[in-house]
Image (spheres, rainbow, N blue to C red):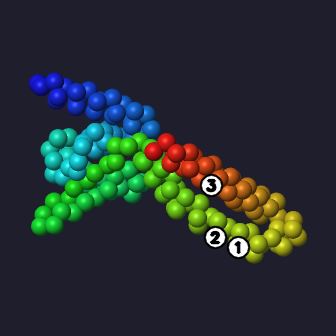
Amino acid sequence: MTIEKQFEEEMNGFFVSIIKGFGFDMLTSKLFSMLFIEPGEISMDDLAERTGYALSGISSKLKMLEGIGFIRKIKKPGSKKLYFIMDSDIKAIMRNKMQKGIEIEINPVKHKIPHILDKYKKQYELSKNDRFKKQYDIVRFYYKQIMQLEKILQKTMEEMEKLM
C-alpha cells in the first residue's frame, strides 16, 4: 500500500470516528469522511465501489447529507452520473449550517409565531385551562429562545467572516 493510500485510510478512520460521535451511522460517517477529504467531486458509483455498499444505500445517505447541508449534488453535462462534493473549509461548512438553520427554523418562527401568539393572547389571559396556558407559555418561551439564538448565530457568523 502506498504512503498516500495509508494517509487517506488513516484520515478517513479518524473522521469516521468523529462523525459517528455525532450520532451518524457507519455508512453516513464513511461518506462524510470520504467527501470531506476528497479534493474534488466524486461520483455516487465511485462512492459505492469504495465503500462496498449498494447504490440504494449510498443514495439515501447522500440525500440525507445533502438535505442537512453538508454536501452538494453536481450533474455534469453529457453524463448520467451523479457527483457529490463537500466544502473542506470547516468555517464555510459551519457558516452554511448556521445559515440553513436560520432559513429552516428561525425565519419561519419569526414570521408565524408572533401572529399565532397574538391571535390567542386574549384567550390566554382569560383562560382557566392550565394545559392551554402551559402550552402557550412553552411556545412563548420557545419564541424568546429562538430570537436569542438568532442573535448568537448572527454574531458568530460575523466573527467567522472576520477570520476568513
For residue 61, say whether it is visible: no
Residue at 16%, 47% in the rendered image: 46
The span from disc 1 to disc 3 (Cα, nearest Å) is 19 Å
Residue under numbered circle 3: 150
The quarter of the displayed image where residue 128 is located: bottom right
- Residue 115 is labelled as 1
Q: Is residue 145 left or right of residue 41?
A: right
Q: Hey, what amino acid is under mark 2?
A: His
Q: Hey, what amino acid is under mark 3?
A: Glu
Q: Position of residue 117 (x, y in %)?
A: 74, 69
Residue under numbered circle 2: 111
Whichever of labels 3 and 2 marks the residue nearer the N terminus, that label is: 2
Pick the front one: 84 or 133: 84
> Is residue 53 depicted above or below 110 in this figure?
above
The C terminus appears in which quarter of the rendering? top left
Q: Hey, what amino acid is under mark 1?
A: His
For residue 126, say whether it is visible: yes
Q: Nearer the viewer, mark 1 or mark 3?
A: 3
The span from disc 1 to disc 2 (Cα, nearest Å) is 8 Å
The span from disc 3 to disc 2 (Cα, nearest Å) is 13 Å
Q: Is residue 127 left or right of residue 145?
A: right
Pick the front one: 69 or 26: 69
